[in-house]
Image (spheres, rainbow, N blue to C red):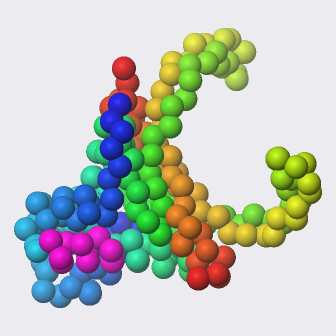
Amino acid sequence: MGEKTLTRMDLSEAVFREVGLSRNESAQLVESMLQHMSDALVRGEQVKISSFGTFSVRDKSARVGRNPKTGEEVPIQPRRVLTFRPSHLMKDRVAEGNRK
Amino acid sequence: MIRSELIQKIADENPHLYQRDVERIVNTVFEEVTNAMARGDRVELRGFGAFSVKKRDARVGRNPRTGETVNVEEKHVPFFKTGKLLRDRLNGKA
């Protein structure tokens, strides 16, 4: 199993190789994709990328949490969380690629 | 927002690019993330989130309809953890 961590740089490098724009412009396009996706999520929209997966925002209600170390009760405020549901295609490819 | 709307937004901002190139760019980015996870790599996008692969151990499952036990093999599943900046923005803190 690979242990590498890819970053924005690797994604823009892939765009650079694929389309032949400058490295700088490729990096800006990757950034702009992430920005548009984030903005949509912050507006409360779902971001649904076919054959990749779906990002959705869920509301969590307030609850009483506990500090696992001290056992102390702490109130957890209501909050919005992001969940990612991978597509079947992604699940299959990840399962297949990592099979021993 | 769906893939085609994302492509459209990027195309609108970049009138000097052909629509088909914008499609290739967007598709390449998602493809690259999936390929990385298929190799067992992580993709860390600061401020947005990180994609990684988690191992699920083999277990004995049960067919909920028949109650029959089945052996489920070890498998790897995609996982996403939201980045701090995006998490804060979702909660109006940034």
- Mark yes or no: residue B1 visible: no
Residue B48 picture location, percent across and down:
47, 67
In this image, A81 relative to A52: left or right?
A: right
Within the image, what quadrant is residue A26 found in? bottom left
Residue in the picture at 68% in, 11% down: B68
Residue in the picture at 52% in, 64% down: B83
Residue in the picture at 61% in, 74% down: B88
Which quarter of the image is occupied by the C terminus of chain A?
top left
Which quarter of the image is occupied by the N terminus of chain A?
top left
In this image, B4 relative to B86: left or right?
A: left
Within the image, what quadrant is residue A11 found in? bottom left
Name the chief secondary structure element in magenta.
helix
Residue B35 picture location, percent across and down:
29, 45
Check the image and report above or below for B34 versus B8.
above
- Mark yes or no: residue B60 visible: yes
- What segment carries the magenta color? A23-32
Residue B16 picture location, percent across and down:
12, 86
Instruction: Verify whether residue B8 appears in magenta.
Output: no
Instruction: Verify whether residue A30 appears in magenta.
Output: yes
Residue in the picture at 58% in, 13% down: B71
Seen as rendered, the residue at the extreme left is A20
Residue A84 picture location, percent across and down:
53, 55
Check the image and report above or below for B45 versus B80.
below
